[in-house]
Image: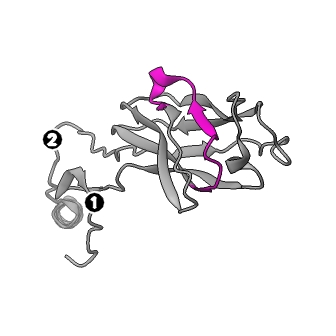
Amino acid sequence: MYNKKYEVMLSVLTILTVIMTATGVSFSYFTNGMIGEKASVTAQTEKIGNVTFDGGADFTTATDIEPDWSESKTFTITAAPSDREQTVYVKMDYVNGMPDLTCSVGEVSEGAKGAITLNADSTSTTVILVEKTFPPSNETRSITYTLTMALPETGENQNESQGKTFEGELYAEFANDYYYNSDNPNGTPIKPNGNV
């Protein structure tokens, strides 16, 4: 009987050993591992800032004028932060019939042209009043200019200016519209084609 117990126990142990071995083999595995360091991937676009032009209020005393009249108005150029240099022109398109009319823009140190000679032959003319270059900057910059128009008293007969008009339009534009991309890092006046 001792033999049978021993055989039964040996059989149970053998079965358990087989089961444990089978289980261990079936649940064992190899795995891959990763070693190394993290790295950042960042990208930032260049800033090409906008420029805003505020032409200011219209003249209020510019009707029925006589010699010794003058009026001034202000206008402002505001440049947003930009990584590129930008040159802005403030221009005036006008038709003038008054030979004695004068025009000037103050703040000559900021690109204003000062005294402007006006054409008085009633033809459409464009004149540059301001040529301002804004260097690259991370700050918004704003400059206000003063435009003064006058019909000065000359001490002589000014009938040639009598009953005449001056009509003008003040506006701003870039010296050149530029497009920037990897092929043109310094800009190009030719709009790139989207087909590569």
Specify whether residue 105 is painted magenta. yes
Image colouring: one colour
How packed mark 2 is, by other alpha carbons closer than 10 Å (few <14, some 14-19, many 20 or more), is: few
**Image side of residue 160 versus residue 180, left or right:** right
User: Residue 73 in the image: x percent, y percent?
Assistant: 72, 35
Range of magenta residues = 94-114
- Residue at horizontal 25%, vertical 52%? 187
Tell which residue pokes out farthest to the top in this image. 109
Q: Which quadrant of the figure contains the C terminus?
A: bottom left
**Image side of residue 51 versus residue 19, left or right:** right
How packed mark 1 is, by other alpha carbons closer than 10 Å (few <14, some 14-19, many 20 or more), is: few
Number of marks drawn: 2
| Viewer-nearest residue: 115 or 155 | 155
Foreground disc of the pair 2, 1: 1
Q: Which quadrant of the figure contains the N terminus?
A: bottom left
Tell which residue pokes out farthest to the front in this image. 157
Chain-order first, disc 2 or disc 1 = 2
Q: Which residue is mark 2?
A: 35
- Residue at horizontal 24%, vertical 64%? 12
User: Residue 116 in the image: x percent, y percent?
Assistant: 51, 37
Q: Which mark is residue 55?
A: none
- Residue at horizontal 46%, vertical 32%? 113
Q: Which mark is residue 189?
A: 1
Q: Amino acid at mark 1?
A: Pro
